[in-house]
Image (tube, rainbow, N blue to C red):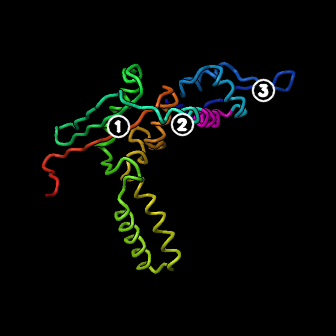
Amino acid sequence: MRQLSKNTKITTSVNEGGEMEIKAELVKQLRERTGVGLMDCKEALKQANGDIEKAIEYLREKGLAKIQKRMAKKAQEGLIAAYIHTGGKIGGMVEVNCETDFVANTKEFQEFAKDMAMQVVAASPLYLRREDVPQEVVEKEKEIYRRQALEAGKPEKIAEKIAEGKIEKYFQEVCLLEQAFIKNPDITVKNLLDDLMMKTGEKIVISRFVRFQLGERDQE
């Protein structure tokens, strides 16, 4: 979604029947940000009392509810995108899948795939989602954080809470879907993916990714 200024003027009025009337300018702004139809945008703004940010959240929840019904479908179309950083010493590849070739050929889908390849290079994720992180890795990281808190003089219960908080931050750093999007840190990669699914009406998944850095080798 394109970001508009937070100072965007809310343009609404109330008709003789006491119902809120949404001005065309606000409907247009919401449509530009979400890609959703005019009638849905108008209804969302009414539900949100003219608040464009709340209207976006309303549309996201409504749109994702529909998408959830499609998650059982197969996503076998899509593309593999690559990004090579200037100098040719770091590169990344990502496979993004969708349901139809039509969506795979859209500008929005192709831009998303390219952005994900760039994200992999810039943010160095180790896993796609938190469920992919081995439990032994999670427990090891959590124990490190707990010991650090105890050594800093924190009580046991507080140390546990600190460790839980830090493990959440760990997931946000190493899991691609939970990382802040490099082009807009106010949203996560999953937020961006959800918005694309809402706009296309299709199931879209990031299937796999790989990051290369010159001179690095897998440990034998």
Q: Residue at x 43, y 78 (%)?
A: 152
Q: Which mark is residue 68?
A: 2
- Give the CA distance from mark 1 to mark 2: 22 Å
Above or below, 94 relative to 154: above
The secondary element bearing badge 1 is classed as helix
**Does the magenta-highlighted stretch encompass residue 169?**
no
Amino acid type, mark 1: Met
Q: Which mark is residue 20?
A: 3
C-alpha separation, residue under disc 3 versus residue under disc 1: 41 Å
First in sequence: mark 3 vs mark 2: 3
Question: On the rendered image, what quadrant is the C terminus found in?
Answer: bottom left
Closer to the camera: disc 3 or disc 2? 2
Q: Position of residue 133 (x, y in %)?
A: 36, 56
The amino acid type of the residue labelled 3 equals Met
Is 178 on the left-hand or right-hand side of 209?
right
Give the residue type that dot 2 points to.
Gln
| Quarter residue 61 falls in | top right
- The range drawn in magenta is 51-62
Q: Which residue is mark 1?
A: 116
In depth, the one of 28 and 81 nearer the eye is: 81
Residue 136 is drawn in which quadrant? bottom left
Rounded to the nearest angstrom, the CA distance separating label 3 from label 2 is 31 Å
Vertical position of residue 26 compared to residue 49: above or below: above
